[in-house]
Amino acid sequence: MNYLKISIYSLLFAVLLAGCKHHEEARRPISRASGTFMKKSADRNKKLVASEEDVIKKIIKSNPKVKYYATKKGYWFSYDEKNNTETTAPRKGDIAYFNLEVKDIEGKVIYSEADLGPQTYYVDKQDIMMGLRDGIKYMKKNETVTFLFPSHMAYGYHGDNKKIGPNQSLICTVTLRNFVPDPAQSSVAAPAAQTKPAAAKPAVSKPAAQTKKDTLNP
């Protein structure tokens, strides 16, 4: 009888041990699959970026008369109209006023200037297309620049949920009409500058004011 109990307990223990071991082993493929998926995803992204850059480089090569400038962010631009008299460009907090036309990489218009209307942008304080966010800071007043943006500097894998599809490279032509400092920042700074003379004034003027008051009202 004791032998039977021992056999049953031994069998149950073996089943439990095998179950735990099987459970642990079953988890391993999940982590392996996850790592494999991430690697494959990274490889796909690299291939996508490389293929988009190849297309852009072909466009640049096919226009030898146009001078294109490469940027550290991974896009290119050329000047349609360059302003050599201005020396300053928009910086953080400035308000930029510009016109914009957006084309696909083959040159077909997606959004015309008329479609989009005049654009107003608070530099580095608004969410706009990543490429434009960076590119506008290269521009001077009254310049027109054409940007060649791969999709990762445009609207990425999701597009704009309207006319621009996923992973779509874009040609954007921007005319920077003007840019000015944010007046809200100027109005905050102005009162601070006025507080110093206002604080110093009573020390000198108070006795004179008191004398005049006593003369009028004895």
Image (tube, grey):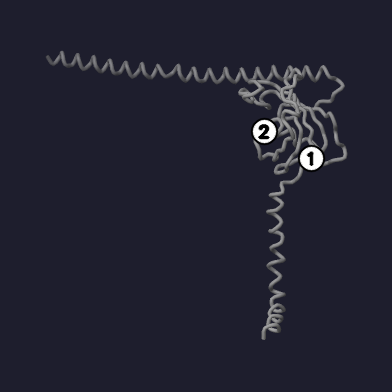
Q: Which residue is mark 2?
A: 128
Disc 2 is placed on an element classified as loop
Decide which of 52, 133 is in the foreground and name it. Answer: 133
| Residue shown at the point (84%, 25%) measured from the top left | 67
Q: Is residue 129 left or right of residue 141?
A: left
Q: How many marks?
A: 2
Look at label 2 and name its amino acid: Ile
Disc 1 is placed on an element classified as strand
Q: Is residue 165 above or below residue 138?
A: above
Image quadrant in which you'd find residue 99: top right
Q: Is residue 130 above or below residue 208?
A: above
The spot of residue 138 in percent (x, y) is 77, 35
Which quadrant is the N terminus positioned in?
A: top left
Q: Which residue is mark 1?
A: 178
| Residue shown at the point (69%, 76%) measured from the top left | 206
The spot of residue 70 in percent (x, y) is 77, 27
Q: Are marks 1 and 2 in contact (CB under 8 Å)?
A: no
Look at label 1 and name its amino acid: Asn
Q: Few, some or many C-alpha atoms within 10 Å of disc 2 (few <14, some 14-19, many ≥20)?
A: some
